Each structure stands twice: as C-alpha cells, then as structure tokens.
C-alpha cells in the first residue's frame, strides 16, 4: 500500500491489482490523481500508522520527504517501508520506474512505462522556434525551471519563461511583471481554475484576457504534473497537441 499520491500512481501503474491492499484517500480524486479511474477499484485509507497497521501490508511505499514520523513508527514495528524520490527529468523518472518495477515484482510493466517515458522525451521538436510559456497558478505563483512541469514543457517544445526570469523554484509574479514578460502561452491549472476561492481570483483577472488571446491560454489538468513518472508521457503529449492546434489555427 502507499502513503502518498505519487506512490499511489506507481502502485496503480506497475503492481498487479491483486497485490494492492489500499491506496491513499487522494488516489480517487481525478483533479489531482492521474490514474483516478483505476483507483476506484481499490479501498483507500488515511496515511496514518493506525489505519495501515490494521491492514498489515507486506510493503509500504512512501516519499522520502513526507510522513517521517509515520514511516519511523512503521519501521519500528517491523514493516518494510520503501521510499520514492522526487523526480523531475525523464531520466530520473525512468530510473525510479525501473527501481519500482523491481521492488513490486513487475519489471515488464516497468519496461513498458520506461519506453513510453523515453519516447515522450525523445520526440522530434515541433517545427519553428520554441515558443515561450509560463505556468500561472493560484495567488500569482509561477513554476520555476526545476519543476516537473518545466521539464514537461521542454520536452513538449516550450521554453519556460521562468528560467529567463531567473526563477528556479515556485515563486510569485505580479500582474505588472507578467504584462512585461508576456510569454507566447499561459498555462493555467484546471484544478485551481475551478476552486472559486480568493487564491484563484487572479486566474480570472480581466488583465489576463487583455494580455492573452483565448488560443494563447492552455488549460492543463493538474493531475498530469502533480507527480512525475506514470503521467509524464500524457503530460508531454497534452502540451504538444495544444501547441500544434494553435499553430494549425494560426496557419
């Protein structure tokens, strides 16, 4: 079983269904879980030691950077806990997929997914110069050059304008800065767009409609880039098709 959403994705993509004891409560949320449809077939439990112990799983998969106390307790009780790393590049995703395939006893499924990852990363660039883009999020944050989405953009044939601005991690940008930068495309998170809270108000600001034509705004499902790995090929494909549609229309 898993301790977080990204571990859920590897279990759903690689493990034999009969071996999945449970997933996290996030696994069935289509807004953030790429394989939410598959997750519907499995029980979900909170990422708490008490809930996990009741299921008595043979293997628990968590993140190196989360649930430290829970992992420590489970290990002290004798449970086997393995950790996945944060992956951004295609090479890192391929290496982690290979490792998880071995751990889960599904090397063939891992090789298939690795093939899809490598194919997405090695696709021929789209004709013409690479257009620029910014991933614009709630409260005016943008995704920096070291994020998963930034690597997806590069493989899809886009330049992350955040790199030109010197932003390597997530950071805020004012509407004035956005107006000056004015990338060719603005990528908006569909999950954030639908929240309707104060933080997402900036995504509906009238200034954006003045700065960007409708075809310059790409609404991208959050589930494609919350985690690296299983969703990566689909994420690259989504952006490549979005760019191609605009170029076809403009042409």
Image (cartoon, helix red, strand yellow):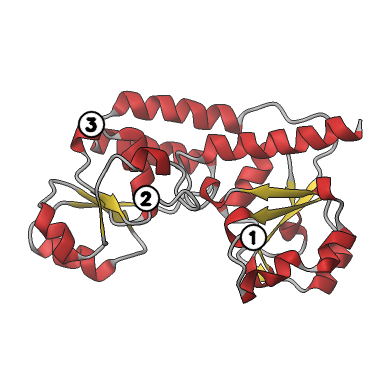
User: Residue at 34% of width from left, 59% of height from top?
Assistant: 64
Q: Nearer the viewer, residue 234 or 201?
A: 201
Does label 2 or label 3 sit earlier along the sequence?
2
Locate residue 185, reporting x and y percent: 79, 50
Label 2 neighbour load within 10 Å: few <14, some 14-19, many 20+: many
Helix, strand or loop at label 1? It is helix
Q: CA distance from mark 2 to mark 3?
A: 21 Å
Q: Secondary structure at mark 2?
A: loop
The residue pinned by badge 3 equals 105
Q: Which of the pair 207/71 is nearer the observer?
A: 207
Which type of secondary structure does the marked residue at label 3 adopt? loop
Nearer the observer: mark 2 or 3; the answer is 2
In this rendering, position of residue 242 left or right of residue 237 = right
For the residues labelled 3 and 1, the Cα–Cα distance comes to 39 Å
Contact check, label 3 and label 1, Cβ < 8 Å: no
Q: Which residue is mark 2?
A: 27
Where's residue 203, x and y in %?
71, 65
User: Is the residue marked by circle 3 packed among few (<14), some (14-19), or many (20+) residues within 10 Å?
Assistant: some
Q: Height in image: 167 above or below 243?
A: below
Which residue shows up at 54% across the image and 49% down it?
225
Identify the residue position indicated by label 1 in the image. Answer: 193
Looking at the image, residue 16 sits to the left or right of residue 220; the answer is left
In this view, 148 is above or below 242: below
- Determine which quarter of the picture holds residue 152: top right
The first of marks 1 and 2 along the sequence is 2
* Residue found at x 73% / y 71%: 173
Give the percent coordinates (x, y) of residue 23. Answer: 28, 50
Cβ atoms under marks 1 and 2 closer than 8 Å = no
The numbered disc on residue 245 is none
């Amino acid at each position: 079983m898993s301790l977080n959403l990204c571990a859920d994705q590897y279990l759903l993509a690689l493990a034999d269904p009969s071996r999945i004891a449970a997933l996290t409560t996030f696994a069935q949320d289509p807004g953030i879980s790429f394989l939410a449809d598959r997750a519907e077939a499995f029980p979900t439990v909170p990422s708490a030691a008490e809930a996990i112990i009741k299921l008595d799983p043979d293997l628990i998969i968590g993140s190196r950077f989360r649930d430290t106390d829970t992992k420590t307790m489970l290990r002290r009780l004798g449970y086997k806990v393995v950790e996945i790393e944060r992956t951004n590049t295609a090479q890192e995703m391929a290496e982690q997929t290979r490792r998880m395939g071995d751990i889960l006893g599904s090397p063939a499924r891992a090789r298939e997914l690795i093939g899809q990852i490598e194919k997405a990363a090695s696709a021929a660039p789209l004709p013409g110069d690479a257009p620029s883009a910014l991933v614009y999020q709630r409260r005016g944050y943008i995704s920096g050059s070291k994020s998963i989405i930034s690597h997806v953009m590069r493989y899809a044939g886009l330049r992350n304008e955040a790199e030109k601005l010197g932003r390597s991690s997530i950071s805020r940008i004012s509407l004035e800065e956005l107006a000056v930068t004015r990338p060719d495309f603005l990528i908006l998170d569909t999950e954030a767009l639908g929240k309707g809270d104060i933080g997402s108000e900036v995504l509906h600001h009238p200034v954006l409609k003045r700065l960007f034509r409708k075809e310059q705004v790409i609404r991208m499902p959050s589930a494609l880039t919350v985690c690296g790995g299983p969703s990566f090929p689909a994420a690259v494909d989504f952006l490549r098709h979005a760019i191609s549609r605009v170029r076809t229309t403009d042409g």
